[in-house]
Image (spheres, coloured by chain):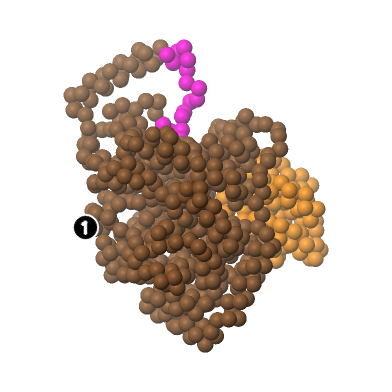
């Protein structure tokens, strides 16, 4: 980056500075800690200079925004052209409750929808299943049937807003419901924009909302790649997610490395099916966490773009530039929110959101300050949305593309992230690849170790968490409560009963039978799922049929 | 030598957030206790069966999904029915303050919310086994 002669001069200057100015200063005022580390426990230098950037050229490391290797961003003008999508993850109670929340958020300026489903839905159970007892609507909205999906989007123009759905094991079932809902409204699928999370690998590794074993699960995922590329071309059929890996305790580097390793695994499964990489890679999207350590997070996003572009271009030989782009959503770190002095979480979230924007995110969810207690109340959500609006309209950070590009510190951290990720790729490869490594508990153990180390640092006060282990106040916390109501549960159960009573039993039975056959065979399952949901088969019925064919996953137990 | 304290750490219900449960399991183990970790998605019946089979002194339940009011008391009730009320039950997770008195009344001996120091949890289980 810098002329070799210049580098030598800088090195001499640095040594001289260390021996004179720095030494003198340290004598008077030593550093307050022996070692300074990131929130991930990675040591950081006191000062970065051109020497930390070595001999790699500007071209190789950065290039221009909108051009390979996309370190500086995927669009030439980034937020000057269009701001990131403000997409707030929302869902509680029944479809009516959540529909109201969606409209509230749209009214206050959010620009994309994002559905949080409740635990039974995530796990493929209807609300009235015995396994669902006590779990209705607490962590998200219950969607058991096409009727629920229609209610959820009632009065919302799904042709003009993009919708993200955080759903994994039963992703293709919920997607089929969304597609069928659009069909009923005569909206062509080619117009639909949105994302299903559909990332099963990180479920085994971290989030743990799995149903089936890895191989049939991966088949279902690839079915959506294939179907989507043909019929729903603007839909992101997967959101390859580091978010949950990080929330479960991983470091920033582990989040980056495991997520990209998973991404490459999906790409392999797609090409193994016989799909051309350029047919489906442009619809692969990503999802990262934003934690408190600002520069570490920014470096992570920049490294992610560079690695993905290289792997798609060099390893998978993708020719379409859109295949090279790592497009990502960001959510601020739920795990960083404290129950103590919860209002302070607004500040944490602002810093995390700043990292996402400086890192070039395509869309952003900001957590609400009350989320260490519950699914957020209205006012808390509004403040979280306002945080994004302040970044967008008041702070000036969206005016320049990759404003930290060229920072010796951020560039050095980005390089370190990249090198570290490749080291993890090698370890995963040595274990036989992602799925064998899951079976051996590799990711799970790595994550548990990091989570424990972090907790010990807090216990030992090596790490200060404001309000938790330092700066403590003894006062009761006041959080506006949000409770799921019995009325919502009653509405949901009534809707479910009506669906089962009013549907055509012959059509239902036939669709279910054909679905089971498709699962047993090798056909793409999406068309059969569509027929099943059109016949008003419920989520639980469909997933039970698939459980019957595919079996269920049992995870290796470790801690 | 004193008998080692045996604790069952369990995740009732559907939620997959196991970070806290695993950290607590490890902290208890590091404090010299014998820990049995059940893994995810255990019904109250599964948990009580495991606790009796493993002859534990105490059970630690972890739940973040909001289903604690249904699931935690169910474990205590089943223990009573199996005449195993000597097994102490504690819980942790995302639990609103206002639920704590009701959980205690239902027989949950302690409730540990977010930010609880591990040392406090270790001390509780140590006392519980006395």
Residue A71 among those drawn in magenta: no
Magenta stretch secondary structure, dominant = loop
Give percent across and percent down for residue B114. 63, 44
Give percent across and percent down for residue A35. 46, 28
Q: Secondary structure at mark 1?
A: loop
Crowd tier of the residue under label 1, counting other residues whose Cα lies within 10 Å: few below 14, some 14–19, many 20 or above: few
**What is the display colour for chain B?**
orange
> In this view of the protein, which residue sits in the foreground, A338 or A432?
A338
> From what the image shows, is residue A255 above or below residue A196?
above
Q: Chain of mark 1?
A: A
> In this view of the protein, which residue sits in the foreground, B54 or B9?
B9
On the picture, is A503 further left or further right than A76? Answer: right
Give percent across and percent down for residue A555. 53, 62
Q: Residue furthest bottom?
A: A506
On the picture, is A146 further left or further right than B68? Answer: left
Name the residue rendered at 59%, 70% in the picture.
A126
Query: What are the residue bounds of the magenta stretch?
Result: A25-44
One can see residue B9 in this view: no
Q: Quadrant of residue B76?
A: bottom right
According to the picture, the residue beneath numbered tag 1 turns out to be: A319
Name the residue rendered at 46%, 12% in the picture.
A28
């Amino acid at each position: 980056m810098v002329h070799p002669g210049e580098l030598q001069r800088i090195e001499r200057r640095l040594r001289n500075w260390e021996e004179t100015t720095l030494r003198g200063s340290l004598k008077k005022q030593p550093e307050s800690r022996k070692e300074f580390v990131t929130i991930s426990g990675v040591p950081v230098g006191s000062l970065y200079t051109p020497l930390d950037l070595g001999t790699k050229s500007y071209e190789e490391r950065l290039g221009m925004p909108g051009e390979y290797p996309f370190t500086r961003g995927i669009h030439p003008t980034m937020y000057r052209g269009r701001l990131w999508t403000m997409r707030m993850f929302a869902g509680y109670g029944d479809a009516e409750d959540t529909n109201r929340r969606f409209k509230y958020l749209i009214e206050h300026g959010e620009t994309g929808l994002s559905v949080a489903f409740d635990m039974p839905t995530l796990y493929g159970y209807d609300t009235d299943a015995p396994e669902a007892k006590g779990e209705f609507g607490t962590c998200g909205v219950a969607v058991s049937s096409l009727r629920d999906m229609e209610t959820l989007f009632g009065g919302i123009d799904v042709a003009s807003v993009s919708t993200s759905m955080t759903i994994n094991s039963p992703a293709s079932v919920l997607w089929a419901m969304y597609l069928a809902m659009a069909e009923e409204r005569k909206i062509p699928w080619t117009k639909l924009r949105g994302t299903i999370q559909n990332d099963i690998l990180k479920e085994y590794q971290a989030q743990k909302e799995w149903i089936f074993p890895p191989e049939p699960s991966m088949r279902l995922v690839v079915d959506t790649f294939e179907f989507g590329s043909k019929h729903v071309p603007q839909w992101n059929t997967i959101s390859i997610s580091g978010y949950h890996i990080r929330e479960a305790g991983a470091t920033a580097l582990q989040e980056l490395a495991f997520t990209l390793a998973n991404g490459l695994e999906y790409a392999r499964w797609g090409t193994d099916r016989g799909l051309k990489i350029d047919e489906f890679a442009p619809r692969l999207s990503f999802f990262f966490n934003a934690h408190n350590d600002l520069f570490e997070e920014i470096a992570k996003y920049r490294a992610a773009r560079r690695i993905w572009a290289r792997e798609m271009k060099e390893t998978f030989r993708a020719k379409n530039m859109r295949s090279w782009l790592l497009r990502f959503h960001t959510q601020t770190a739920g795990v960083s929110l404290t129950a103590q002095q919860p209002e302070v979480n607004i500040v944490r979230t602002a810093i995390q959101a700043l990292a996402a924007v400086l890192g070039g995110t395509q869309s952003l969810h900001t957590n609400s300050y009350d989320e260490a207690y519950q699914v957020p109340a209205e006012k808390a959500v509004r403040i979280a949305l306002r945080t994004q609006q302040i970044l967008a309209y008041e702070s000036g950070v969206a005016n320049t593309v990759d404003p930290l590009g060229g920072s010796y510190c951020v560039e050095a951290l980005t390089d370190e992230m990249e090198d570290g990720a490749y080291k993890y790729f090698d370890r995963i490869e040595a274990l036989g690849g992602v799925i064998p490594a899951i079976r051996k508990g590799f990711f799970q153990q790595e994550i548990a170790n990091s989570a424990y180390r972090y907790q010990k640092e807090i216990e030992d006060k090596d790490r200060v968490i404001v309000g938790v282990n330092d700066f403590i106040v003894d006062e009761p916390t006041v959080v506006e409560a949000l409770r799921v109501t019995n009325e919502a549960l009653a509405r949901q159960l009534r809707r479910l009963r009506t669906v089962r009573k009013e549907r055509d039993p012959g059509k239902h039975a036939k669709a279910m039978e054909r679905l089971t056959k498709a699962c047993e065979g090798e056909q793409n399952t999406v068309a059969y799922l569509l027929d099943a949901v059109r016949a008003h088969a419920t989520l639980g019925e469909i997933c039970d049929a698939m459980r019957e064919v595919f079996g269920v996953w049992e995870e290796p137990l470790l801690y | 030598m004193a008998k080692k304290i045996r604790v069952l750490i369990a995740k009732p219900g559907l939620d997959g957030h196991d970070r806290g449960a695993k950290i607590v399991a490890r902290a208890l183990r590091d404090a010299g206790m014998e820990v049995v970790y059940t893994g995810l998605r255990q019904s109250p019946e599964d948990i009580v069966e495991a606790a009796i089979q493993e002859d534990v002194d105490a059970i630690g339940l972890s739940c973040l999904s909001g289903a604690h009011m249904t699931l935690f008391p169910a474990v205590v009730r089943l223990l009573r029915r199996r005449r195993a009320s000597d097994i102490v039950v504690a819980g942790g997770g995302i639990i609103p303050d206002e639920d704590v008195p009701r959980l205690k009344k239902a027989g949950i001996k302690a409730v540990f919310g977010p930010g609880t120091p591990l040392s406090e949890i270790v001390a509780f289980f140590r006392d519980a086994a006395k």
